[in-house]
Amino acid sequence: MSDTLLDIAMLHADSLIINARAGSTRAFSKLVSLWYKRIYNFGFKYFGDHDMAMEIAQKSFITVHQSLKMLKDPGSFKPWLYRIAINHCHDEERKSRRNKVFSMFKEDGRMDEMLETQMEAPSNAPDSALHKNDLAHVVINSLSQLSEEQREVVIMKEYEGLKFKEIASILTISENTAKSRLYYALKTMKKYL
Amino acid sequence: MFHQNHTAMNKRPSEEQIIDFLFGYLTPEERNKFEEYLQTDAELRNELEQLVATRKLMAVVADEEVIEPPMDQIVDTTSNRSLLPRSVWIVSSIAASICLIMLMGFMTNMNITYANREISLSFGEPTEARQQANFSSLLADYKKTSSHELQQATSLLRADLTNLVLDSQERQQEEIKKFNTRPRLSKTQVDTLINEFKQANTKSMQEFYSQSSEQQEAYLKSLFAQFYEYLDKQREQDLKFIQANMLRLKNDTDERQEQTEEVLARIITTVNQDNSIGQ
């Protein structure tokens, strides 16, 4: 994957991080500009929902602003930021699961049926007939069928372009575990695509 | 990476090896061995094809464009956030409520009694019989005094009303008498009065116009003076704003240049390192 100027700037933003850590609002603002889109997209693929993605991005940068002083090595900003985002994703997932338990008493499961129909549709229809947006929607839905552990690895590797070493460090697992999770995630997704 | 480095693979590669192959992380030697094995395992070939297809489909999902919220929103949320954990707030508010209830109980002489499997709350003197007796005597007193007071008030009201009617009748008769005894004016006197009134009216109107035009002139002068003052201030502010922007632009340019130099230095260092490793 060829790096764009933005990617290079993101990788070499040490001085920005140091200034932001020292309390410069402008430096922090630039950091947010550099990374907001990445964290939003991470959240969007994790939940498949714009509002949730905005929530994750906003909460992540609030945490960054509160805890940046604790980050000793500016070089480890990237894994640190993704770890914060993942923790917020887990929190939101837990909250929505709790809400789902409550709503189970109210709803009659029509949403689940609808989702299942949506997931089954592509296998019946020819690929050429699917619009690109519809296809993207199906992919996002198939991501939501994965377990938390598999989903986060897939997004970090396939969409965020992180190295297995970085993923392992963020999730505090071994590289082989990360690879194994990705393998099973891809196999699961194949069933829905 | 592989279990047997020097010979061809004779068993199915692990999931990690398959992923390494998919992402091109195998060394050329490992890749050759993997591909040799693939020739012998149709099932794995099929699986790999499906995995590649899945990844291709996944690539359809592009990044969503998003505009970051204003910086103030993040900073304000951070600064407004309480340093105390939520649980501490909950415990403190419960404790404060209990204290408040106790204080109110003390001030209102609240009694809590338990008898015959019933908890009862009461305020003030707790004796029920005394309260009943007090209530009866109070009711009797109230009835007695209220009927007496009502009679007195009614008689006073009647007397007042009679006086009022008599007064108004007297005043009415006096007004009628005054009207009848008033001297009558002749036609010429009425005309003279009207003329005088017209002249006085014209004079006062002229005075009013002259005064109002003077006032308007003074008002316009002060208005223009204020407007010039406002323009001066506005121009001063604009100049300050432009100066501040110029300064910020300069700072931005300096900082960007610094960052660019940093990035370039790193690129040059990386390229130099790569070259030295290659040599």
Image (cartoon, helix red, strand yellow):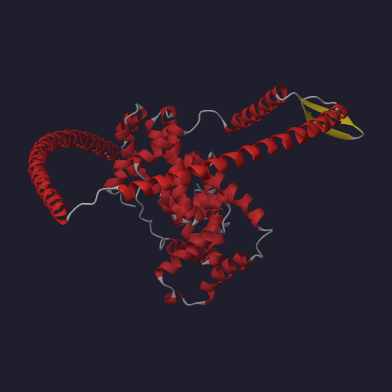
Side (left or right) of B275 relative to A145: left
Q: Is residue B53 above or below residue B21?
A: below
Q: Position of residue B24 (x, y in %)?
A: 42, 53
Which corner quadrant holds the C terminus of chain B? top left
Q: Nearer the viewer, residue A94 or A188?
A: A94
Q: Quadrant of residue A120?
A: bottom right
Residue at the image point whose x is 46% and y is 42% from the top: A59
Q: Nearer the viewer, residue B90 or B68?
A: B90
Side (left or right) of B48 relative to B222: right
Residue at the image point whose x is 31% and y is 39% from the top: A30
Q: Is residue A166 visible?
A: no
Q: Position of residue B13 (x, y in %)?
A: 55, 55
Q: Is residue B43 visible?
A: yes
Residue at the image point whose x is 17% and y is 33% from the top: B244
Side (left or right) of B128 relative to B192: right
Q: Quadrant of residue B121?
A: top right
Q: Nearer the viewer, residue A187 or B203?
A: B203
Q: Position of residue A24 (x, y in %)?
A: 32, 30
